[in-house]
Amino acid sequence: MSFGLFTNFALQIKTGLIAMMVDMSNFDPNGISVPNNNIFGLPFTLEEAELVIVPVPWEVTVSFRSGTARSPENMLKASLQVDLYDSEYKNSWKKGIHMLGIDKKLLLKNDYLRKENELYLNFIKTGEKVDNNKFMCKTLMDVNEGCKLMNEWVYEKTINLLNSGKKVGLLGGDHSVSLGFLKALAEKHDSFGILQIDAHCDLRKSYEGLDYSHGSIMYNVLSTIPSVSKLMQLGVRDYCESEWEYICNSKYKIVTYFEHELKERLYNGQNWNQITAEIVSQLPDKVYISYDIDGLDAKLCPHTGTPVPGGFDMEQLNFIFKKIMESGKTIIGFDLCETGVSSDGWDENVGSRILFKLSNLMISQGQ
Ligand SMILES: [Mn+2]
């Protein structure tokens, strides 16, 4: 494929001639990717794409290892290596996938507040009371306010895209980024469930004093978005007692498949197909996939923010997604979060392949 195509597209946008008529005659899906193109090396503009990926470069509340705010830009590069041929969802990409540019202001704000939050976390580790320290009270207030603004930013971006008829996927950043998108989806869908892939429950109330921590995302979702009728968590293997109690008191609104239980069932002779059927049957008709990459085996995501031993193989989860599609349920949106940044590009390589699979799921469904 030649660089001429990109110029050609730019010209068509300027002259307003694009509409849905994308000239793919010069695009070779079997050829090498053109770096100037968009995600997965695809040539679609925002206007042409059926699915829009919104990158959210944010990791202000991460408590262990940083990097995930940079993963959208790294995944964009890594995505050029993903082959467009998907044996399950052939040619789905032809409906158009486009990733928005990284918002530089949001990234700068993230960098500043992340440092502030580090100061705050180091302070509370000393065991001193925040209330007694005016400087720390102000720092905490700034961090919480910044996270609130990020949520509003995500809401505005995603509701506008949904209103213009686009399908939307979110690319974090840490897991806290999903709240605004889920609020936007709740305006479009009366009732839906969340399928959460995660090593953690993320059900902590105001984790470490932070209102919008990655460790509180599902608590915040359930306490502020009544349209979420069910939360199904898969692969959890690191959680605290209050989260366990919260699940037990949820009257089965939260169904958690803990990793040790899943493994035990497999060891006792059940197969993945049986377990998958059980999982899929409990999901409501409309499903949002919240994919925290740390739900996978850490060998697939060694630089994620809070890795935990154990976890899924990628294909195990793809199998569940396939069965959801076969069941006739609708996937209304997704997020992919917590992909780390690695010097050899491995984490981003895995992440971009998951992003392509999630994109294909969404886009292969009818409008
Ligand atoms: Mn998470």
Image: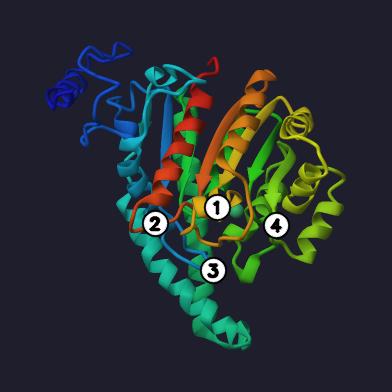
**Marked residue nearer the N-terminal end (3 or 2):** 3
Amino acid type for the residue under numbered disc 2? Val
**Marked residue nearer the N-terminal end (3 or 1):** 3
Q: Residue at x 40, y 18 (%)?
A: 95
Which residue position holds label 2? 341
Classify mark 1 as within 8 Å of ligand 1 or not, answering yes or no.
Answer: yes
Which residue position holds label 3? 63
Choose top left, top right, bottom left or bottom right for residue 82. top left
Name the mark nearer the viewer: 4 or 3: 4
* CB-based contact (under 8 Å), mark 4 and mark 3: no
Q: Is residue 256 visible?
A: no
The image position of residue 115, as x and y in percent, is 41, 72
* CB-based contact (under 8 Å), mark 1 and mark 2: no
Amino acid type for the residue under numbered disc 3? Ser
Q: Secondary structure at mark 3?
A: loop
Nearer-the-camera pick, 338 or 147: 338
Q: Residue at x 49, y 53 (%)?
A: 301
Classify mark 4 as within 8 Å of ligand 1 or not, answering yes or no.
Answer: no
Name the mark nearer the viewer: 1 or 2: 2
> Is residue 264 shown left or right of residue 61?
right
**Marked residue nearer the N-terminal end (4 or 3):** 3
CA separation in Å, label 1 and label 4: 17 Å
Which residue position holds label 1? 175
Specify the label residue 237 is tagged with. Answer: 4
